[in-house]
Image: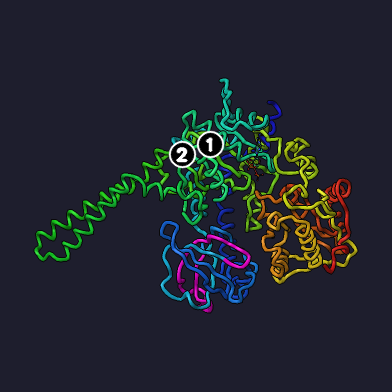
Amino acid sequence: MEGGKAKMKSSAVTLDQFVSIMAPLIDLEKEAEISASINTGASRNLETAQKKGSTIINLKCVDAQTGLMGKTLIEFQSNKGDVLPAHKFSTHDVVVMKPNKADIGSPALGQGVVYRLKDSSITVAFDDIPEEGLNSSLRLEKVANEVTYRRMKDALIQLSKGIQRGPASDLIPVLFGETPPAVSKKDLTFSPFNSNLDHSQKEAISKALASKNVFLLHGPPGTGKTTTVVEIILQEVKRGSKILACAASNIAVDNMVERLVRHRVKLVRVGHPARLLPQVLESALDSQVLRGDNSSLANDIRKEMKALNGKLLKTRDKNTRREIQKELRTLSKEERKRQQLAVTDVIKNADVVLTTLTGASSRKLDRTSFDLVIIDEAAQALEIQCWIALLKGSRCILAGDHLQLPPTIQSAEAEKKGLGRTLFERLADMYGNDVMSMLTVQYRMHELIMDWSSKELYNSKVKAHSSVAAHMLYDLEDAKKTSSTEPTLLLIDSAGCDMEEKKDEEESTLNEGEAEVAMAHAKRLVQSGVQASDIGIITPYNAQVVLLKMIKSNDEKLKDLEISTVDGFQGREKEAIIISMVRSNSKNEVGFLSDRRRMNVAVTRARRQCCLVCDTETVSSDAFLKRLIEYFEEHGEYSSASEYCNE
Ligand SMILES: Nc1ncnc2c1ncn2[C@@H]1O[C@H](COP(=O)(O)OP(=O)(O)OP(=O)(O)O)[C@@H](O)[C@H]1O
């Protein structure tokens, strides 16, 4: 305990310090996001804006469908029908649609939310179908999402007031190191809903149930973090707790919804329908409200009001008109009340409310407090975002892995000054194992893939479960045992092969030789019977992603191969992962490859084969990467990139 206390002093931040440090950093980040968008001096012309990734020009509308609770889904493709240019659009972003040549700052034809993204198309959900302009050339612009910042600022203001009587009044001092965390002494053995839980998962769940204020669930890659979170939620519901379950991303929230629905938990998913997976729409607040009694009453009232309005139009008598207007006002008030009651009913009756961290500030949750706030993917969320949810509860459980990538921050200055330091990391430093448990059995990777990461980042504590420890790529249905499918680890070395890196116009790095080699290996795997959809090529650099996608578009057999940045692939997995490291230069510069967390994420996406394509001479200049290369050389197969050229 002494050690724990010493640690606590060195890394504790007071509430006042936190508020005063964070307020300007949120502004910096907001400015960085706005200046990356099109309407500012930084990018006055369309081509520049396209290069910056904040707009996509020369689009045509190829499909329009209604559905999704009244929204219209419009699919856009490039006028030429090929791969979309490099862009920074993600699903769930807010975008506006404009005529292609319209002036910057001109009014939009419609505003919507990105619903689906493919290499060559983008689908947007609009509230209303734009009335005209869909037949001509169009462009989409990304809109800076100011609401998110406003909500973070609001949370900061609430924190600064020290809301003494709010639901989180006892939690705040613990999370700022003023009061030590407490643990229940009662015996908290539980009978699990999931009979497959391993020892580390069970131990973590017991500790979580015993925690009185805060618990950190540390889940290295593939260790069943979400499985464990779901079991904690089920146990807490059984105990009678009302739970707010959040994550930074919609997909992670939906993932929890899908798993909980199977257990018939009384839950509601709060959020914009265009941001939800189709399979969770039934659980959405909007659809539950529509099914409620108060909502049908509100509907009846609306019908009555329509009839009265008709009568009003026909009546000339002043007194009768006055009477009708009075009645309409009363009905309108009643209708609003019924609508609100319909929402309140659904939220009141749910044992678990699920939403993104930003969504937790929805006014619909204004008067609801929770016994427990659970945040999944907490190591990928800004601390201030977590507070939006935490202020609503008296206890919290954060699940995540601070040894994978932190949230993306746009402003370099805000990042340097600490905006990206996550609450998960801060609490792990402050309280360590007093409040934390690590899962140690992983269910994804062959043990050779896991062992490097386990040794480098997790003190060799993570072990592969027997169901995956020795699984091979050629064990997959239809796959053959060939020199390409046989290795679990494969190093393809471009040193001395004349494959130097280049910069694109946006100063992102790419490497044409490496891209060809990565693609050649993917082709060999497909020829050996591996499904293209089981293969992923990941790379740290955006420009390399675009290049790889362009090469891929020429080959029909590779249609289902996925290509992504490492950062964009966090949380995902593939049977075979090919990593294109890109850097190859005489100065031996490795840039942000040296971030241990990025390579940890990259390597641990692979289930059965991890192939590293790189210039070993350049990347070995970094001690951490050198150990990675040595590990692959020792435990895997080695080839020269020259063996893959001209295929
Ligand atoms: N005790 C278990 N027994 C068998 N399989 C398990 C167990 N726990 C988890 N799994 C499996 O491991 C996989 C990963 O689980 P889950 O999605 O919960 O992990 P995660 O830690 O959230 O993943 P990520 O690494 O992407 O964050 C799933 O296929 C899940 O079914």
Crowd rating for badge 1 (residues with CA inside 10 Å; few <14, some 14–19, many 20+)? many
Question: Residues at badges 2 and 1 in contact (C-beta under 8 Å)?
Answer: yes
Residue at 53% across, 67% down: 75
Front-most of 377 and 299?
A: 299
Q: Provide residue 222's location: percent of width, then percent of height.
A: 68, 42
**Name of the residue lying farthest toward the right:** 496
Residue 504 position by quadrant: bottom right
Give the magenta-colored segment's residue range: 95-121
User: Quadrant location of the C terminus?
Assistant: bottom right
Per the image, the residue denoted by label 2 is: 163
Q: Which residue is at the front of the view, 428 or 157?
A: 428
CB of residue at label 1: within 8 Å of ligand 1?
Answer: no
Q: Is residue 401 magenta?
A: no
On screen, residue 229 versus residue 601, left or right, reads: left
Residue 88: give x, y in percent of width and height.
Answer: 61, 63
Q: Residue furthest front?
A: 478
Label 2 to label 1: alpha-carbon separation: 9 Å
Label 2 residue near ligand 1, CB within 8 Å: no
Left of 295 or right of it: where is 484?
right
Considering depth in this image, is 310 or 335 the residue closer to the camera? 310
- Residue type at mark 2: give it: Ile
Identify residue for label 1.
172
Dot 2: few (<14), some (14–19), or many (≥20) neighbours within 10 Å?
A: some
Q: Is residue 295 above or below residue 207?
A: below
| Element assignment for label 1 | helix
Residue 94 spot, x, y in % from top left: 51, 61
Side of 570 where 169 appears, left or right: left
* Image point (58%, 26%), residue name: 183
Within the displayed image, which quadrant is ligand 1 positioned in? top right
